[in-house]
Image: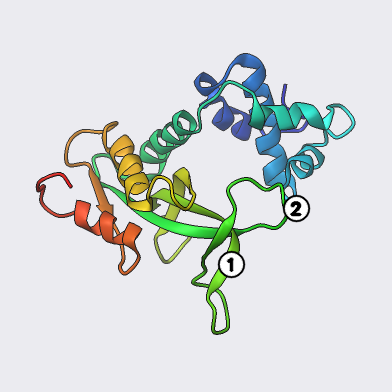
Amino acid sequence: MLPDGTLPSLAALLAVFRSCFTAPGHRSFAALAVGLIAQTRRRTVCGMLLGAGLERAWHHCRAHRFFSTARWCTDALGLALCDLIVARLLPPGSAITVVVDDTLFKRSGKKVFGVAWHHDGAAKGPKPIGFGNCWVIAGIIVQLPFLSRPLCLPVLARLWRPGRTGKIAFAREMVEAIAARYPPGWCTPSGTPPTPVNTYAAWTSQSPGPAG
């Protein structure tokens, strides 16, 4: 059940993702999504409960369990979002432009999972590094009528950790997952050098070659 006062149009939009969850899982997802949108301060798990007006109705453990133990797949959710973007925001039959990039999400604390020191392109000073999570993100490029420039809408993500699966491998995995959902030729990955992830995306937009 969504919080009272939820816009019918938003409820209908969130219903698109019902197949990605169990019935209780979808109720939690919808409520937290409403809280994420409504929250004007920190968008933590508890912050989303506050934004949804559920801080007195739900114990915070219910919201945390949605992310830690509930049965749902981030890829299934992301690909459902991709289908929604293609259906609602792209001209019929147009190519789907996929952009892949890596970004640093700064974190602090001894118990934060997957943190390390990473290159930080936005850092000021002689040492462009930062501590946190490095995410490899795949997004769909759309052109909205109220914006003068294209917009990238993220759909899939991978947490990169030093010494494990590489960023380029993650980029390829996500691009192929998106491309597999649509007819051949519809998906055109693109990228901007010089980062390795973007270099891979640019390579995939060229004519097919031997796998490597």
In three-dimensional space, the C-alpha distance between marks 1 and 2, rounded to whole angstroms, equals 21 Å
Q: Position of residue 159 (x, y in %)?
A: 50, 46
> Disc count in the image?
2
Circle 2: is it few (<14), some (14-19), or many (20+) Cα within 10 Å?
A: few
Foreground residue among 9 and 67:
67
In the figure, is residue 210 to the left or right of 75? left
The disc placed on residue 27 is none
| Residue 54 in sight | yes
Is any part of residue 143 visible from this angle? Answer: no
Residue sticking out furthest to the front: 163
Q: Write down the residue under mark 2.
A: 42
> Where is residue 129, by image quadrant?
bottom right
Of residue 10 and residue 127, the one placed in the foreground of this image is 127
| Helix, strand or loop for disc 2 | loop
Q: What is the residue that sits farthest to the right in this orientation?
A: 56
Q: Pinpoint residue 88: horizontal percent, then vertical percent.
A: 41, 39
Which is more toward the observer, 120 or 9?
A: 120
- Residue type of the residue flagged with mark 1: Gly
| Amino acid type, residue under disc 2 in the picture | Arg
**Residue picked out by circle 1:** 130
**In this rendering, position of residue 175 left or right of residue 30:** left
Please report the residue visible at 15 percent of the width from the left and 44 percent of the height from the top.
211
Task: From the top left corner, tell me how far across and down residue 11 is, in percent.
Answer: 62, 29
Which residue shows up at 33% across the image and 40% down it? 173
Which numbered mark, 1 or 2, is in the foreground of this view? Answer: 1
Which residue is pictured at 38% across the width and 52% down the height?
A: 167
